[in-house]
Image: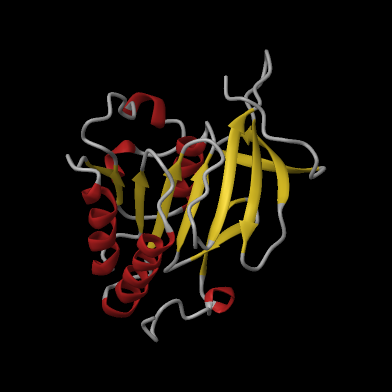
Amino acid sequence: MNAQLLKRQSHRDPQQPFLGDLALPLARVHEFCGNARRTLAMMLAARMTGPVFWIAPGWASGRLNPDGMLHVVDPARLTFLTPRRPEDLLWCMEEVLRTGAVPLVVADIPAPPALTPVRRLHLAAEAGASQGRLRPLGLLLTPGDGGAQGVESRWQMAGAHGLDAHGWTLNRQRARAAPPMIWRVIPSGAQFRLTRLPNQDACGADI
């Protein structure tokens, strides 16, 4: 194994806040899963500045609706990349991370990747941090319960909406420096408020 793989310094690295006092180590790759994973990704993008590169399969039928994004993040900040071949999804993400020119790189993929591709993404993010202008953050969006191997952290979010209020359940499934934990996420003006829930509460279905 390459000696430069995964420097294991994430707990000391600068972190990017994204909800309340929750934050993600930069120059690393994280996973958002669950039915509301794209909403969570937009919440993260809203806490950051600069462009966002959003990579999704060119053969997928669904596309993000800019009008639906306006209440969370300015869609003008997003650049959409749509590779035509499955093998190009993570290759594209790797190349963008390696430049260190884009603060947030999102790959909206149909299934969790294996360990080796994720390690390559970590290396690309570290290279981007050392050679580029900033410390890029890589984000994998995966369906269901996720399961990408080797990610820095994994977060699942699903809708928990009521008749008169919107809300979500956020589950930190794993993180290298923090235990599993569950929160209720509620809109509060232009921001979002977190309320800690008992860990036995499961993420609900998105509606």
* Residue 123 x, y percent position in the rendering: 35, 72
Residue at 21% of width from left, 50% of height from top?
88
* Residue 96 x, y percent position in the rendering: 25, 60
Residue at 29% of width from left, 40% of height from top?
56
Q: Is residue 120 above or below residue 195?
A: below
Is 72 displayed left or right of 134 in the figure?
right
Instruction: Please name the colour scheme applied to the rendered image.
Output: secondary structure
Place residue 206 in its image quadrant: top right
Residue at 43% of width from left, 61% of height from top?
115
Q: Quadrant of the C terminus?
A: top right
Place residue 137 in its image quadrant: bottom left
Number of numbered markers: 0
Q: Quadrant of the N terminus?
A: bottom left
Extreme residue toward the left, this view: 84
Is 148 displayed left or right of 107 in the figure?
right
* Residue 101 x, y percent position in the rendering: 26, 65
* Residue 114 x, y percent position in the rendering: 42, 56
Extreme residue toward the top, this view: 163
Is 34 displayed left or right of 68 in the figure?
right
Place residue 73 in its image quadrant: top left
Extreme residue toward the bottom, this view: 3
Residue situated in front as seen by the camera: 204 or 44: 204
Residue situated in front as seen by the camera: 70 or 174: 174
Is 138 displayed left or right of 63 in the figure?
right
Q: Is residue 15 above or below residue 154?
A: below
Residue at 27% of width from left, 74% of height from top?
132
